[in-house]
Image (spheres, helix red, strand yellow):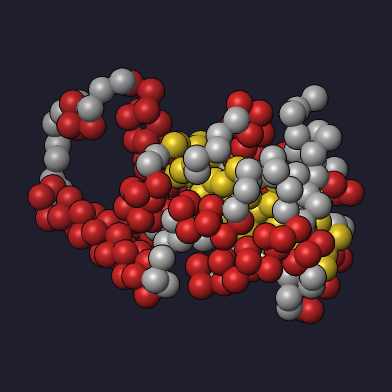
Amino acid sequence: MGRLDNKHIAIVGLGLMGEVLLERLLVVGLFPKEQIVACEPRADRQEMIRSRLGVVVTADNRNAADADILTFCVPPSSLLPVLTELAPFLRPGQIVISVAAAVPVAAIERTVGGMIVVVRALTNSPALIGQGVTAVSWGRLKTQEARELVTELLACWGDAVEVPDELMNLCVGLTAAAPTYIFPIIEALANVGVQGGLPADVALRMAAGVVRASGALVLQAGKAPAALQALTPLQPLREAEAKALFVEAVQVARSRMDALQGKLKL
């Protein structure tokens, strides 16, 4: 039995990430349905989630206040107003997890006050299948119990990597948005395969498999990517140009998050 078995969780916001988290919790079996409450203002989303996943869904965010773990999957501009609404009802020892980009831990802690454990978690789209990479930053209060609970919870998304909160805007470009750089590569490789005569499903399987296997090799071989690259003598890619595109993408994403943070006056 896991540490989360006797805990209750609330998910505030049932947009893309809120729905992904809820589905993964149910698929992995971390919480029974009766220990989950979801909060969503849109009536159509409420009914869809309620009928499809069978959990309690409410429009009143205050119903989240009794949970042991409160996960906020709302847009950055909505996070602090929602937390301000709930702050008077929170109790010491509760865990607040935010998946909102650009809102730092310090701003969340100022809003909820007291002895509340605050965590930020930025994942990416492979979390849909439990293969995501989630950047995690902690606030000032980090008990051993909270660390164990959050670690078990975030494992339903995939791998979790702890980083300083001041680098979370960088992680938006490095991990959260990064699949949008990789999918075009897979598509381009698969298209070339199809143009050369391969069936579409075969070409796509090969292209996606190369990306998956290359990442696994880097993580498991214990060698730098450059050393592994040398294992393949034929290297026709214009490497400098390709690297520059990725660097630019990460920098642009970080700049946009920095700008959003400034706009939110945090």
Q: Is residue 11 visible?
A: yes
Residue depicted at 63% across the width and 63% down the height: 83
Residue at 80% from the left image edge and 45% from the top image edge: 8
Q: Of all residues shown, which one is farthest toward the bottom?
A: 43
**Residue 32 percent across, percent down from the top left:** 85, 43
Q: Nearer the viewer, residue 190 or 88?
A: 88
Relative height, residue 63 to residue 90 (above, below): below
Q: Position of residue 68 (x, y in %)?
A: 75, 44
| Residue 18 in view | no
Q: Quadrant of residue 28?
A: top right
Q: Nearer the viewer, residue 71 or 111?
A: 111
In the picture, the quarter occupied by the C terminus is bottom left
* Residue 99: image location, x then y, percent: 54, 56
Residue with the most extreme top position: 222
Residue in the image at 55% along x and 38% along y = 141
At 62% across and 37% down in the image, what residue appears?
150
**Side of 146 relative to 236 (left or right):** right
